[in-house]
Amino acid sequence: MKKVRTTFTCAIGTSLVFLIVAGLGSCKQSKPTSPEAALLFESVIPRPVSATPTGKTFSLKNETKIIVDATAVGAKEVAQYLAGRIGPATGFLFSVEETTGEVPDDAIYLTTTGGNAELGEEGYEITIDEDQLKVIANSAAGLFYSVQTIRQLLPEKVELTDVQEGPWDIATGTIRDYPEFGWRGSMLDVSRHFFGVDDVRRYIDLITAYKMNVLHLHLSDDQGWRIEIKSWPNLAIHGGSTQVGGGKGGYYTQEQYADIVRYASERFVTIVPEIDLPGHINAALASYGELNPDGKPTELYTGTDVGFSTLRIDREVSFEFVDDVMRELAALTPTPYLHIGGDEAHVTKKEDYIAFVNRFAEIVKSHGKRMIGWEDIAQADLDSNAVAQHWHSNELASEAASKGAKIILSPATRVYIDMQYDSTTKLGLHWAAYIEVDDAYDWNPETHLEGVPRDLILGVETPLWTETITTMDDIEYMVFPRLTGIAEVAWTPASQRGWDNYKVRLGNHAKRMQLLGINYYESPLVPWVK
Ligand code: TNX
């Protein structure tokens, strides 16, 4: 039943329409879009492929229902996630109901029926009129991304967890949206400094708000081994017992790691585990001396040098170790990829390095997974199953591409968000560049590298190395707001992107980031609206 309305704007004479609909209720209220709701509609990050406003208002109310198409696989879970995100601040219950029939007014309706091919696996279309907000997608992932957009269409205070006063108005209109790249990732180095499960969950929540779908965890390095391996227990117990600066370190038990993977997959995020081989391996060499070329365990390492350690190649034990680790990791990984590192093996002879990587590729394949490595693996015999992650060398990336490998773009001069913003930034490094917010945004993955065709590019991933990063606040300061721009580089087609437009939208996100408790960097290049 429609409620008694205050303003009547019927096309024909009000009294006539009133007579006709009197028995049903009243004539329809029409409330124009408020300037606040209009601004939110224009400010979505990543920028949608198209967004057309129609000038009216859809308001969430206590009786608003979230309705899902009963035939849509996974839609109910997405609806519950939506209710969980917008319920606390609005104070509305948002009961989730399934239907195969008519959808009533005052509803948010999620369906996977009626989408077209252009939306792809991850796209969505939101149609908002005064009575209903309807989403069509081809999969639950698309519905999930529509929810991230819906959050941004609502007043910022929707992000708070205690009840706020309304109104909860959304501008009416249509948004059609789908990603340019399927790989929209971030990497978190939990080896140089360890971050526990709660931090990783928060990190997942933050990246999914901008429609990222990969979290690559750098689980081992010289300074720390961070995942329990049951067949080699000392890796975590001893190898995980410290970190840069000599703090106590830590590691994930397999149960905790499985919890991270589950939390991520509920948010359509793939966790890519990395064990860095054959260099960056001191934490393992300190735990098991038989892996070290001289057969003796090394000391644990808490400095920040790179490129000084290597597995031994002259004994099978190294490959038994890698096989055991990859088997256990594969069992914890429901998605296709295992990352073998492969970077900066400066003390591994070139012929040994190539032999190593070729064996690693076989091992990863034998566990039913696809190998990713930093682009240095281009020196080995790659095939089209392999993925090379570009970070510093166009030559190596194009060599990998010429062997048919797929490419992930993580150019250090653009998306290494452990790089300082400028020379006054207290955290971070600057060996690759100073990376201001515009530098991280203003580049094009399709044309960034020579000799790498578009169809081999999986997408973009932004790494956060943590030599200088010790707390979640530090993480957020380096990541925000560069990650939001990198998310747009990966999601939005180049034709829809531009710094001058983006910086204004980013400025309009200040309040939202603040209410999400994000410790972001207030770049002087952005017109922040607070
Ligand atoms: C290079 S990029 C590294 C890391 C460091 C990082 C610091 C890459 C594959 N290796 O080991 O942590 O620089 O910026």
Image: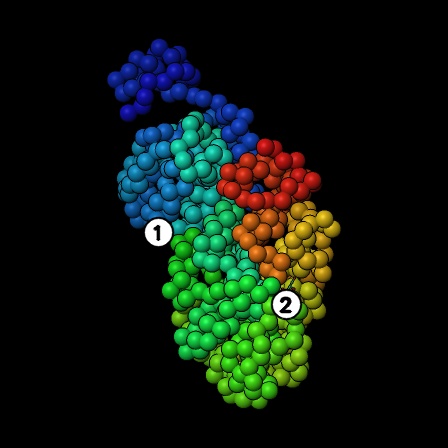
Ligand 1 is found in the corner quadrant, namely bottom right
Task: From the image, tell me which residue sits under label 2.
Answer: 303
Q: Position of residue 224 (x, y in %)?
A: 54, 69
Of all residues, the one furthest to the top in this rendering is: 15
- Would you say the residues marked 1 and 2 are in contact, meaning their CB atoms lie under 8 Å apart? no
Residue 120 is situated, as x and y percent measured from the top left of the image, at 47, 52
Circle 2: residue type: Gly
The residue located at (52%, 61%) in the rendering is 194
Identify which amino acid the numbered label 1 is placed on.
Gly
Residue at far right of view:
423
Q: Quadrant of the C terminus?
A: top right
Query: Pointer 1: residues within 10 angstroms few (<14), some, or many (20+)?
Result: some
Residue drawn where x is 62% and y is 77% of the image: 309
Task: Reply above or below: 80 against 93.
Answer: below
Q: Is residue 49 visible?
A: no
Q: Which residue is mark 1?
A: 74
